[in-house]
Image: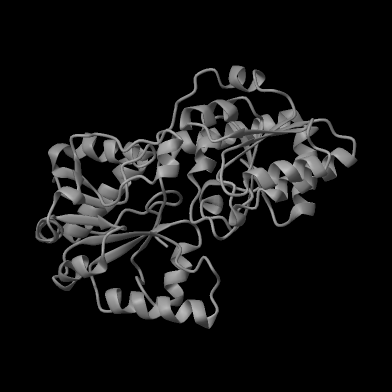
Amino acid sequence: MTVRVVLFSNTLNHYMQAVSDAFFEQLGDQYAFVENAALDAERRALGWKSAEAPYLKRSSDMTRQELAQLLMESDLVIFGAVPFSLVKPRLKMERLSFFYTERVLKKGDGPLVFLPRWLKYRNVFGSVKHCSLLATGSRCASDFERMGLFSGKRFVWGYFPAVRRLEDRDGLFDDKEPASIVWAGRFIDWKHPELLLHTAKRLREKGLTFRVTMVGGGPLFGEMQELAGKLGLRETVSFTGPVSPEAVRGYMEGSEIFVHTAGRDEGWGVVLQEAMNALCAPVVKRDMGAAECLIEDNVNGRFYRDEQELAVILEELLTNREKTRTMALKGLDGLEELWNPETAVSRFLETARAMEQGKALPVYGDGPMKRL
């Protein structure tokens, strides 16, 4: 049974297109992606593009009435970046819907943060029976559990950039620069790029030889360059400045270890998947959104809590290339077998069809559409 699926999100960028292509492959013209925002200037400067595709619709080309009609008449709607005022009529009619979101308590869960969000989401979803949660990130579902929402209707979800299938894995790893670390992202305060610089200083003081490449730009870029100089790291750390997504991939393919320094503020972190697909062994904070979805500690990556623990883990990986290789290969296995657009879409459609038909839902032990 074919369903008519509409996904409302921000832009059809390079990591939203892969999952949309997978929907289109299975549903054909019964699938549409509605783009609700234009790419910002910073991302356009980095080479990001809003793709063209046969299933793409732009809200800027539609009237509010046309958007509301599409929301109401579609068999199944996945919505994130769309005003709740447009969605409410559909929810009141109990049409099958999925709310696609990262965690909503990124800034903590004290009363001043929790109560406004509790009121907001209870007002929209409090009495709705046929809307489920696509929980993007390992802590998202628990945020809504605290609010008493989506009980029995919470599913593991995420972002699903295209996964490149690598034939010569060992050859790619052998070609990487030994003892090399890559960091990639925007140089902003909550991404904490300074954490890696301070850790690099610790490792240098222990006599380790290694290279760090920090990829990207942002408000703190100059400050981080200055900090690297003050810490005596000019020969150890290099800064690329803003580069295209393809160039980011190149730096990852040349590096053995990927370090991510954001914590709970990172709702998901597609850059982690990109690094794992480039055969980097990932070292991340446990509370970043994608971490516990994609990584099993000490199997296909490592979790750390603070600078001291990060230094210990990096020393181990920098001095044990075979362990680093094994983790990187395991990480790639997880993407190819489970965390990819094709698997996510197949599982989603199987679950949605079961809901439509009133049948028992499929049970997945791990990965996309695991019930929470």
How many badges with numbers are in the image?
0
Q: Is residue 177 above or below residue 38?
A: above
**Residue at image location 70% in from the left, 23% down from the top:** 177
Residue in front for this viewpoint, 188 or 258: 188
Residue 140, position as x, y percentages in the image: 46, 63
Side (left or right) of 139 relative to 62: right
Q: Quadrant of the C terminus?
A: bottom left
- The answer to whether residue 236 of the structure is visible from this angle is yes
Side (left or right) of 321 relative to 252: right
Which quadrant of the structure image shows residue 93? bottom left
Q: Is residue 138 above or below residue 125?
A: above
Side (left or right) of 247 relative to 49: right
- The answer to whether residue 339 of the structure is visible from this angle is no
Residue 74, position as x, y percentages in the image: 13, 55
**Residue at image location 14% in from the left, 45% down from the top:** 2
Residue 10, position as x, y percentages in the image: 32, 51
Side (left or right) of 261 relative to 38: right
Residue 154, position as x, y percentages in the image: 37, 63
Which quadrant of the structure image shows residue 265? bottom right
Residue in front for this viewpoint, 216 or 273: 216
Colouring scheme, one of rainbow, by chain, secondary structure, one colour: one colour
Q: Is residue 136 above or below residue 340?
A: below
